[in-house]
Amino acid sequence: MDILVIFKLVLVLLLVFILFNLARALFIMVKAESQQSMSQYLGRRVIFSALVMLLLLLALGFGWISPNPRPY
């Protein structure tokens, strides 16, 4: 497999995991009698969001991806 395909697959999986943790935190917040802490899921979301940003910056630096020159 090409490195670009693997990179994109990892990014998509990380984004899905981020959304999953956000949804888990939402359900814990809505469910008032839950004993679990909502902050652990929100903390995971923040950590993996930072990891996605770091991976995107590294990919830009290595030239694996290129930014859109005209975003409009």
Image: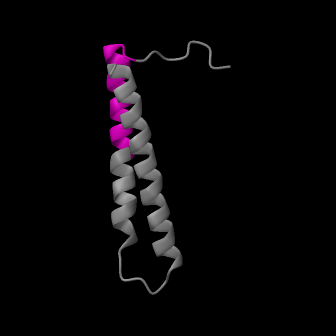
Q: Residue at x 38, y 19 (%)?
A: 60
Q: Position of residue 63 (x, y in %)?
A: 36, 13
Q: Position of residue 48 (x, y in %)?
A: 35, 46
Residue most toward the right? 72
Q: Nearer the viewer, residue 21 or 67?
A: 21
Q: Quadrant of the C terminus?
A: top right
* Residue drawn at the location 40% of the way across and 70% of the way down: 38
* Residue 15 against residue 25 in the figure, above or below: above
For the stretch drawn in magenta, what is the main secondary structure? helix
Q: Which residues are magenta?
A: 49-64
Residue drawn at the location 41% of the way across and 29% of the way down: 8
Residue 40 occupies which quadrant of the picture? bottom left
What coloring was used for the rendering?
one colour
Residue at 36 percent across and 36 percent down: it is 10
Q: Residue furthest front?
A: 1
Task: Specify the quadrant that holds the N terminus.
Answer: top left
Q: Dividing the picture into quarters, in which one does residue 3 lie?
A: top left
Up-down: is 55 above or below 23? Answer: above
- Across and down, in percent, residue 52 comes to 38, 38
- Marks counted in the figure total 0
Magenta-span inclusion, residue 59: yes
Query: Quick check: is 6 in the magenta stretch?
Result: no
Q: Position of residue 49 (x, y in %)?
A: 39, 44
Compared to residue 57, the image places residue 32 above or below, namely: below
Q: Is residue 29 left or right of residue 48?
A: right
